[in-house]
Amino acid sequence: MNRYRTAAGVILLAIAALGWFVWATRSPGAPYAFKLGLDLAGGTELVYKADMSETPASERSGALAALRGVIDRRVNLFGVAEPLVQTEHSSAVAAAQEYRLIVDLPGVTNVKAAVTALGKTPTLNFRLATTTTAKNATSSQVAFLPTGLTGRYLSGASLQFGSTQSNALGAPEVLLKFDSKGAKLFEQITSKHVGQRLAIFLDGQPISTPVIQEAIPGGTAVISGHFNVKQARDLVQNLNFGALPVPISLESSSSVGPTLGAAAIHDGIIAGIIGFALVVFFMLLWYRLPGLVATTALFGYLALVLSIMKIIPITLTASGIAGLILSFGMAVDANVLIFERIKEELREGKGAREATHIGFARAWPAIRDGHVTMLISSVVLFWLGTSIVQGFAFTFALGVLASLVSAVFVSRILLLALLPEGNEGIWRYLTSCGFHLRVPLSDKN
C-alpha cells in the first residue's frame, strides 16, 4: 500500500509540474509557446506542384529535398517570422505520382507579393573574392565580383572520396563538371586568379568558398576541404538541383486574417472548457470517487499532451485540435470500461483490492484493442492524407498514446493508493454509481 501511495504522490507532483509548465508558457512570446498554424495565427499558404516528368525516379526525392532548401532560403530572405516549408508526395498506391511543395508564411497576407518573391527561378553563379578598402575605413573589406560563370555552364556535380593527394585518406570531395563553354571560361578564371577564393552563390547567398589552387583546364574541378559527408552531399544537391531546379507551378493559395484566427482560438478554448467540464461533472456524478480519480488522470493526460506539443514543437492547427479532442474521448472511454468492470466485481462480493486488480485486468483487452485500432487508423491517415489530414492524424496518435498511459497507469496507481486499510463499507459506497439503471427480468412471456 505504501508503494502505491508513494507512486501516487510522484504522479500528482508530475501532473502539477506539467500543468504549471503549460500555464507558464501560454503567452505567445514565451519560450515553448504554442506554435500555431496559419488557420489559427493568420497568414498565407502557397501550394506548388513540382514537375518531375524530366527527373529520373531515383533522383526525385533528392530533387524535392533540394528544391525545399532553395525555397526555404528564399523564404528567410523574404523576412518571414517562423516560416514552414514542407514537401509531400502521393502514396505508392495512388494512380498518379504527384509532388508538392507547401509554404506557410505566418503574418503575410499579401499573396501576390509572396508568390512574386518565391516563384522566380533560382540563380547559381561563381564570384571572385577581392579585397577592397572603402573611404574613411580603417580595415579592408571583402567583395565578391561576378565572373560571368553561372549555373547554365555547369553540367553536374558528384560526390567522391580522396582522389587528390591532400585527401589521400578518403575525405569527401565534390567533383564539378562544366560544358565546353564553361570549361574555357573556368580555365581563364582559374589561370588569372590562383590563390583567390572563387565563391559559389545560390540565390545571392554563398554556399561554398573554395580557394583556387592552380589553373584548371578541361572543365573538371574538385572542391576539397574540411567538411563531412553530409555537408558534401548537400553541396552536391545544391549544385545539381539548385542550378537546374525542378519546375514548379503555383497550384493554390489561401490567406487567413489574424482576426479570424484569433476567433477560432477563442471559440476552441471555450468549447474545450465546456466539454471538459461536462465530462468531469458526469464522471463525478456517476462514479463518485473513481470519477475524481478519472478527472485527475484526465488533467494529467492534457498536461502531458500539451507539454509534448510545446517541447517538440508541434504546429497546432484546427484539425490538430480536433484530433486532440477525439483522443480525449478515448481516455474517458477507457476509464468508463475500467470502473464498470470494478463495479461488477464488487457486486459479486469481492474485496476492494481484488476487485480493482481484476477490474483492470478484465478491461485491459478491450482498452488495448481499441487504442491499437485507433493507432492503425492514424498511421493510415498520415500515410495517405494531405498535410491537413496528417496534422490531425499525428495529434490524434499522440493523444491516443497519452490516454493509454493516463487510463491504465495513472488511474490504476491512484485507485490502488486510495484503497482502505480496514472497513470497506465506505469504499463500496464511494465506488458505486449514484444511479442504477436496471431492467427487471421476468420469466413470463
Image (cartoon, rainbow, N blue to C red):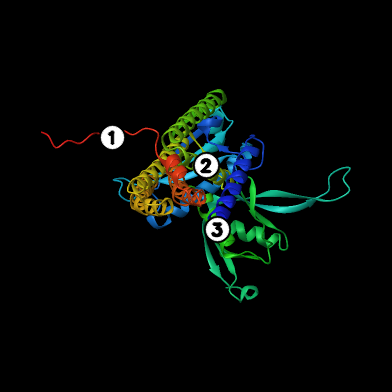
Amino acid type assigned to the residue bearing label 3 in the image: Arg
Q: Residue under circle 3?
A: 3
Q: Identify whether 115 is placed above or below 406.
A: above
Q: Quadrant of the C terminus?
A: top left
Taking the spot 69% from the left edge, 62% from the top edge, the residue there is: 211
Q: Residue under circle 2?
A: 296
Q: Identify whether 216 is placed above or below 432.
A: below
Q: Is residue 402 left or right of residue 203?
A: left
* Residue 79 placement (x, y as % from top left): 64, 37
Alpha carbon of mark 1 to alpha carbon of mark 3: how far?
38 Å
Q: Is residue 22 left or right of residue 51?
A: right
Q: Nearer the viewer, residue 394 or 64?
A: 394
Question: 10 Å neighbourhood of mark 1: few (<14), some, or many (≥20)?
Answer: few
* Residue 350 placement (x, y as % from top left): 37, 51
Question: 10 Å neighbourhood of mark 3: few (<14), some, or many (≥20)?
Answer: few
Q: Quadrant of residue 323?
A: top left
User: Which numbered disc, 1 or 3, marks the residue closer to the eye?
Assistant: 1
Amino acid type assigned to the residue bearing label 2 in the image: Thr
- Do the CB atoms of the residues marked 3 and 2 lie less than 8 Å apart? no
Q: Residue under circle 1?
A: 438
